[in-house]
Image (cartoon, rainbow, N blue to C red):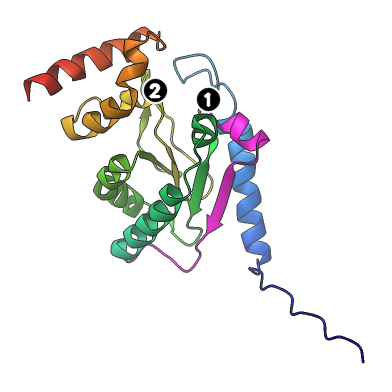
Amino acid sequence: MKAESPPLPLKTQLSIADVRHAVALLDWLKDYISLPHPEIGRSGPVCPFVPLSLRSDQVRIVLHDEIDGTDPDAVRALLLAYLAEFTATTPASANLRRQRSLVIAFPAITAEREHILAEVHESAKSDLVRNGAMLGQFYESCQETAVRNPEFLVSTGPVPCFVIRHMAPHDVLFLHDRPDWFAEYHRRFAGEYRAGKIHDPLLVRLFQQAETQLEKS
């Protein structure tokens, strides 16, 4: 008697629209985020970690077309659920940690509702920082500017999305101006400054200023 074949594992079914959105995000990661830009205010890619992350297959993209931006609480709950999973699977290797990123995309959020991402970003950022993670927001109308060029709107993208990644030494740029955020950064990276591993004058200056304020608080 012929043995019965085991059932095939269930797989997520992607629509053609899903594939197109994923391809648009991948092209954006390769052709914008991974390349230098004349307005970024420094040399190197827009995000220095993404080129290696793509080569090492450490980028994941998830699409949630059931979320249209009418319920900010649903967006925030989904984001925090992904944060829990992301931090629970943190690699032991520092190099791998800095290569990992998760793109959470919302194709159904229209231009009129893109501001929901800014609201959720503001309300959830502290949760991510406490867990050693960083949160980026990207969409066509995003008003975030480059640190070294406040005239350049750096966080635009083809599909509204959040990006979660692990905290890295350069994140003092984004965490120096709040004592609670900087305390988490300081706990993780102060040793690298003490050992002289960080040489960028801007990072060193921001670290020293924030550390002085932290000591006073």
Tell me where residue 196 appears, x and y as whole percent: 38, 8
Q: Tell me the CA gap for discs 1 and 2.
A: 10 Å
Does 57 appear in magenta?
yes
Q: Nearer the viewer, residue 117 or 194?
A: 194
* Residue underneath mark 1: 48
Relative to residue 185, is residue 105 depicted above or below? below
- Residue 130 falls in which quadrant of the image? top left
Q: Nearer the viewer, residue 214 or 61?
A: 214
* Residue underneath mark 2: 170
Relative to residue 68, is residue 4 depicted above or below? below
Which region of the structure is painted magenta?
Answer: 48-70
| Callout 2 crowding tier (Cα within 10 Å): few <14, some 14–19, many ≥20 | some
Q: Who's the residue at 33% across and 13% down the image?
A: 193
Residue found at the very far left of the displayed protein: 216
Q: Quadrant of the N terminus?
A: bottom right
* Residue 89 disc label: none
Q: Nearer the viewer, residue 197 or 26?
A: 197
Disc 1 marks a residue whose amino acid type is: Pro
Does 15 appear in magenta?
no
Q: Who's the residue at 37% across and 10% down the image?
A: 195
Tell me where residue 211 appears, x and y as whole percent: 19, 18
Relative to residue 16, is residue 210 depicted above or below? above
Q: Is residue 70 visible?
A: yes
Q: Who's the residue at 26% across and 16% down the image?
A: 206
